[in-house]
Every structure is written in structure tokens, then in C-alpha cells.
Image (cartoon, grey):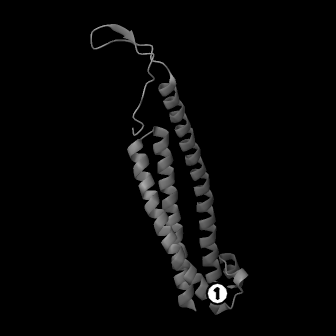
Amino acid sequence: MNDLFTRLCEDLDNEVERQETLLAVCRAQLDALNTRNLAAIEARTAALDILVRETAHAAAARTVSISAVARELVLPPEQRTLSGLIALTSKPWSERLLHAQTRLKRVLNESRRVVRMNAHMLRRSLDLNQRLLACVALGPNPDPAYSERGIFSAIAETPARIDQKG
């Protein structure tokens, strides 16, 4: 039984570390958004993609650990949660599980806050860019120009076009 708890606690400690890393990358992404550093934004987004995939993969292993402990304790399905395990487990395991749960909750709450800030910043930037493109694409160009024959003409008849690929 101790081996099962050891494995579960290791899985939870690894998850806390992963979530703390995700939080750090999300904060770095917010900094890159604030400074409008496109290369840094792309790098942070790529890092987040990798970390999210790792987290999803590790969730399966953690579920196996929790299920193994729950079977040993003969927990009903509705109590097969971290809180359920903490309530029915004796010290020192209950303390270690509670510590991991507290850290996870803190990191996840902070991550949600930072992700909301990132999403807000990205939506604002996207909105601004779309409005600017609409202004440029629809507005007449008041600058005069010369035709190929050297005749003065206004370009106002044709709307400006921008390559939207960047």
C-alpha cells in the first residue's frame, strides 16, 4: 500500500511542477503580449502546446495511480477524488496529499487568472488589428499619383489592399 501512495504522491508532485511551469510560461506570454514581441509570443505559445500535451499524457498515469489506491481502500466511485482520499487516509499520507492538493489549487487558480488576462489581451489586439485593416481596406486613398503616361490622377477610385498574411 505504501508503494501505491508513494507513486501517487510522486505523480501529484510532478503535476504541481508541470502546472507551475505552465503558469510561468503563461506569465511570460503575457509579458510578450504587453511588449508586442511576436517572436516571443510564438515561442511561448509553442511551449504551452508542448506542456499541455505532456499534462494530458500525465493525467492518464495519475488516474491509474488514484484508481489503484481507491481500489485498495475500497472507495466508492463518488469518493475517488483527491479530497476523498485525503479524508480516508491516515498520516503521513493524508498530510502529503493535502499539501499537494493545496499547491495544485493555488497554481490552478493563478493560472486561470493569467490565462484570462492573456485571452483579454489577445482579443483586444485582434479587435484593433481587424478595425485597422477594415479602415485601410475601405477608406479612399487621398494621395495623388501619376499614371504610366505621366498624367496626374487621384487613386481614390480604388480601395487599398493589404496582403493579410502579414
Instruction: Pinpoint residue 110: horizontal percent, then vertical percent.
Output: 60, 56
The residue shown at (50%, 74%) is 58
Q: For this rendering, which residue is in front, 3 or 122?
A: 122
In the rendered image, which residue does mark 1 sit on? 70
125 sits left or right of 150 in the view: right
Q: For this rendering, which residue is in front, 147 or 83?
A: 147
Instruction: Pinpoint residue 25: horizontal percent, then vertical percent.
Output: 47, 55
Indicate whether 48 appears above or below 95: above
Could you say whether the residue bearing mark 1 is in a helix, strand or loop? helix
Asked whether the viewer can see residue 14, the reply is: no
Disc 1 residue crowd, few under 14, some 14–19, many 20+, Cα 10 Å: many
Indicate whether 120 appears above or below 74: above
Q: Name the amino acid, label 1.
A: Ala
List the single residue furthest toward the left: 149
Quadrant placement of the N terminus: bottom right
The residue shown at (60%, 61%) is 108
92 sits left or right of 149 in the view: right
Instruction: Pinpoint residue 73: horizontal percent, then vertical percent.
Output: 66, 90
